[in-house]
Image (spheres, coloured by chain):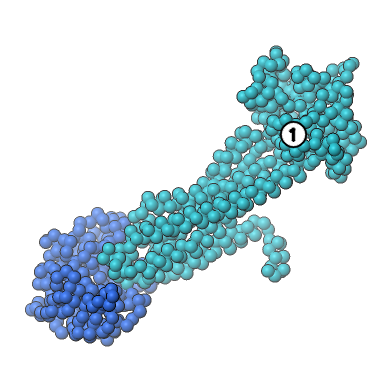
Chain colours: A blue, B cyan
């Protein structure tokens, strides 16, 4: 494994509340080392996705700290959190959520549309490189809805990596795929994250994803119920 | 505004002032665009959204195009009518008629529109004809037609004045000779039998075997006289069983002078004085209890002013319609963005600034608006051309419709105004809850 370039994560007394101030997630303390691959599992409604959204700065916590290295994103306003995501986070969703009218390179390089002009060429180049690594057609003439479900999810992975993020957050990335495609995507995701030492946090019900992770966090009723280190090759534990 | 600015503006060439006004009206939209889109490359996504919602976009564009077309068409049509009707009246300096409506008399005398006018008697006509300042005076006689062409009785002298030289042949010199307008499908040497009356009510054969021979053709004048057949006034009176304007012992030579006692009457006397000042003198002299003298140009100007007022009122209504349609389209756009909410939320989740969502939504709206406005402009001109050709076919007043600055000003103002309105749905879309939209 390469030297981790990803960010470490430290959570302190993280509390996320829902409507009416109801607590939906509370994590008193959690530390994840830079460059590690962590899976988060738990029953539906347990708070896994809320945790992921909080780590991405999509949810404002009611209390606590979310430290990526030394940068606490919890008190940041929305523009600063958006800038943080742009700079630091690559996101993969359960549904690929592509713009079907765009080509694979068009989708993968989506970030080029809203980043500074000086960074656009680099994003496009990285998007093309990731598509190649993932074995995808880089034709600009082919609409993305002409790809299979597995290929589309790989395009979404290329999109997550195009802005060269330190952290990859994935929310049930294999849920809509058949077994073969799910396995391939889980392999790709972990391999691409490890290749450059990015921190990978994946919310998933899929045992294939858990098996490839360095650590598995179990969430139940909005709390961290278990934290299991696995002996994955090259794992970096906190 | 400072006087120096106003003076400078007034000194500009008209085309430059129009161009500057156009740019000034369009400037808010461009400035907004530059501000809103600054730092983003929204082209590919905008194109994707338009393709994704192609039919909805087409409907929105069509609605805007129709509403803008109405406004632009109204302006172009009013201008076309004004520009078309004015030259048609150029040759008619002064009209003297029996008291009544100047507009009706003008429409009858200048535009050959059928109407039931009281007649000027022979003594009055003689007073006009023998006035020392009158250079040309001509009576008019209506009532007959050939196909759709009115047969107009008048004098050869007036036809010569009106046509400024025939395109072909000569002026009529005998009672049953005729000069055809440029759009009448009769050539020199052809003959025609007039029907009594005009249009569907015309009685064919009412004048027996009477035939006129066409001896000359007028050049195109762009007036309703292009569709008329000009014949000696004596023949019109004669075929209707009236005196022919000449007393016993008439030598058969047509044209003035007419004998007052044998003058059956004319709905209008077309007068040209020997000078402009004399025209005013005659107008004053014959504006009496028994006669009405008016300048068709003045009446036309009043009509044009009225048309302009109506057009302005309708333009306001058209603009209100345009804004309402656009507001409807923007409201529709709000609903449309709900369909796109998940993907817009995705962009936010990936780190796109809220301003990017704002720019994307705004540019989506402005693309629909500006496309609709441009198409509306073309639609308005096309509709005006179609209507103008119908008016020209029916009246022979050459009405043309071309794209001009007022329409461009209207559209530029509309685009800028609605570009400002489009900020609202963009603002609301930008502030949609990301998590809720992501979860769909």
Q: Residue at x 76, y 22 (%)?
A: B236
Given residues B318 and B391, the one toward you in this image is B318
Q: Position of residue B192 (x, y in %)?
A: 68, 19
Res A51 quadrant in image: bottom left
Say if residue B386 shows up in the picture.
yes
Direction from residue A44 to residue B434 in the image, left or right: right
Where the C terminus of chain B falls, by quadrant? bottom left
Direction from residue B368 to residue B73 in the image, left or right: right
Q: Position of residue B388 (x, y in %)?
A: 60, 40
Please say if B438 is above or below B414: below
Secondary structure of residue under mark 1 = helix
Please count the marks in the image.
Answer: 1
Q: Residue furthest front?
A: A20
Residue receiving disc 1: B109
Please say if B239 is above or below A20: above
Res B224 quadrant in image: top right
Direction from residue B381 to residue A200 in the image, left or right: left
Res B154 quadrant in image: top right
Q: Residue furthest right?
A: B132
Q: Residue at x 66, y 49 (%)?
A: B308
Where the N terminus of chain B falls, by quadrant? bottom right
Chain letter for mark 1? B
Q: Position of residue B304 (x, y in %)?
A: 69, 46
Q: Residue at x 49, y 50 (%)?
A: B65
């Amino acid at each position: 494994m390469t030297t981790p370039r990803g960010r470490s994560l430290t959570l302190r007394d993280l509390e996320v509340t829902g409507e009416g101030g109801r607590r939906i997630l509370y994590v008193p303390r959690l530390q994840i080392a830079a460059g590690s691959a962590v899976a988060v599992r738990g029953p539906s409604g347990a708070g896994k996705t809320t945790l992921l959204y909080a780590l991405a700065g999509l949810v404002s916590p009611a209390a606590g700290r979310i430290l990526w290295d030394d940068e606490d994103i919890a008190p940041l306003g929305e523009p600063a959190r958006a800038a943080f995501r742009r700079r630091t986070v690559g996101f993969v969703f359960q549904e690929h959520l592509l713009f079907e009218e765009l080509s694979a390179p068009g989708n993968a390089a989506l970030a080029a549309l809203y980043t500074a002009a000086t960074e656009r060429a680099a994003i496009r180049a990285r998007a093309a490189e990731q598509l190649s690594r993932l074995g995808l057609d880089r034709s600009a003439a082919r609409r993305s809805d002409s790809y299979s479900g597995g290929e589309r999810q790989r395009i979404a992975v290329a999109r997550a990596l195009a802005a060269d993020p330190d952290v990859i957050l994935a929310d049930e990335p294999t849920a809509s795929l058949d077994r073969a495609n799910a396995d391939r995507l889980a392999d790709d995701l972990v391999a691409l994250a490890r290749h450059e030492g990015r921190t990978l946090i994946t919310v998933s019900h899929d045992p294939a994803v858990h098996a490839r992770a360095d650590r598995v966090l179990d969430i139940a009723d909005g709390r961290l119920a278990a934290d299991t280190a696995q002996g994955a090759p090259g794992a970096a534990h906190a | 505004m400072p006087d120096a600015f106003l003076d400078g503006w007034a000194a500009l060439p008209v085309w430059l002032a129009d161009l500057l006004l156009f740019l000034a009206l369009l400037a808010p939209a461009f400035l907004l665009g530059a501000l809103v889109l600054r730092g983003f490359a929204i082209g590919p996504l905008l194109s994707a959204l338009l393709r994704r919602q192609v039919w909805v976009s087409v409907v929105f564009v069509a609605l805007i195009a129709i509403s803008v077309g109405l406004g632009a068409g109204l302006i172009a049509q009013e201008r076309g009518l004004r520009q078309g009707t004015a030259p048609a009246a150029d040759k008619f300096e002064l009209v003297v008629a029996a008291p009544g409506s100047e507009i009706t008399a003008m429409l009858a005398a200048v535009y050959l529109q059928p109407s039931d006018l009281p007649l000027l008697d022979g003594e009055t006509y003689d007073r006009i004809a023998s006035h020392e300042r009158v250079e040309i005076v001509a009576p008019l006689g209506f009532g007959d037609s050939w196909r759709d062409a009115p047969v107009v009785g008048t004098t050869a002298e007036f036809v010569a004045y009106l046509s400024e030289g025939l395109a072909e042949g000569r002026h009529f010199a005998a009672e049953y000779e005729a000069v055809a307008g440029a759009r009448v499908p009769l050539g020199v040497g052809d003959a025609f039998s007039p029907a009594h009356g005009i249009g569907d009510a015309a009685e064919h054969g009412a004048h027996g075997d009477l035939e006129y021979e066409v001896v000359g053709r007028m050049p195109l004048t762009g007036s309703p006289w292009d569709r008329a057949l000009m014949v000696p006034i004596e023949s019109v009176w004669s075929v209707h069983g009236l005196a022919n304007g000449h007393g016993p012992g008439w030598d058969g030579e047509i044209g003035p002078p007419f004998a007052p006692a044998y003058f059956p009457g004319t709905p209008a006397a077309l007068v040209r004085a020997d000078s402009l000042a004399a025209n005013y003198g005659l107008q004053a002299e014959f504006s009496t209890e028994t006669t009405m003298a008016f300048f068709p140009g003045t009446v036309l100007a009043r009509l044009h002013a009225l048309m302009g007022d109506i057009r302005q009122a309708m333009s306001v209504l058209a603009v209100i319609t345009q804004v309402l349609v656009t507001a409807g389209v923007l409201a529709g756009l709000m609903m449309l963005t709900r369909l796109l909410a998940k993907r817009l939320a995705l962009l936010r989740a990936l780190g796109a600034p809220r301003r990017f969502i704002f720019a994307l939504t705004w540019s989506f709206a402005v693309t629909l608006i500006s496309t609709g406005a441009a198409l509306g402009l073309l639609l308005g001109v096309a509709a005006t051309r179609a209507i103008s050709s119908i008016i020209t076919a029916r009246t022979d007043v050459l009405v043309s419709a071309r794209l001009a600055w007022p329409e461009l000003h209207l559209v530029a103002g509309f685009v800028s105004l609605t570009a400002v309105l489009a900020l609202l749905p963009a603002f609301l879309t930008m502030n949609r809850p990301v998590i809720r939209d992501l979860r769909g």
